[in-house]
Image: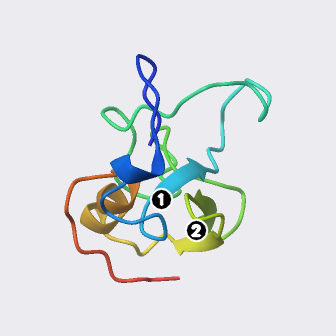
Amino acid sequence: VFYQDRTSNIADITDGTSNTIAIVETNGLTEPWTAPVDLDIRTKSDMINDPSQLGVSSDHPGGANALFVDGSIHFLPDTLSPMELEGMLTRGGGETVSPMY
């Protein structure tokens, strides 16, 4: 949703605000949660709660929480496929994402 070199507005989120993740839990960062640190979707793990690589993760068993652009918060199960997770992390990729939460 966010880009360092330009601003975003609701019209840019063509996948829909209820289908697009704005903020995710990321376990293992050393920065405070309030720090303006982005998870790089190009290098993140494709799995939720992957113990071997930084990505969408938490101390909760079975998944992690995510804030969607519409303001809703959902628990994403670690059974979510990499394709579904990637679809939720892009704002205009045209992916069809079925709610898994």
Residue under numbered circle 1? 48
Residue at 72% x, 57% y: name it.
59
In-image side of 64 versus 83 (left or right)? right
Task: Find numbered disc 1 in the image and state the secondary structure of the residue it sits on.
Answer: loop
* Figure disc tally: 2
Asked if the residue under mark 1 is in contact with the one under mark 2, i.e. CB atoms within 8 Å, the reply is yes
The quarter of the rendered structure image containing the N terminus is top left
How far from the left and from the top, in percent, is residue 70? Answer: 58, 65
Task: Find numbered disc 2 in the image and state the secondary structure of the residue it sits on.
Answer: strand
How far from the left and from the top, in percent, is residue 35? Answer: 74, 25
Residue under numbered circle 2? 63
Residue at 58% x, 68% y: name it.
63
Q: Amino acid at mark 2?
A: Gly
In-image side of 95 versus 39 (left or right)? left
Residue at 27% x, 52% y: name it.
92
The one nearer the camera, 5 or 79, is: 5
Relative to 73, say whether 54 is above or below: above
How far from the left and from the top, in percent, is residue 69? Answer: 55, 58
Q: Amino acid at mark 1?
A: Ile
Q: Earlier in the sequence, mark 2 or mark 1?
A: 1
Badge 1 density bin: few <14, some 14–19, many ≥20, Cα 10 Å? many
Residue at 54% x, 30% y: name it.
38
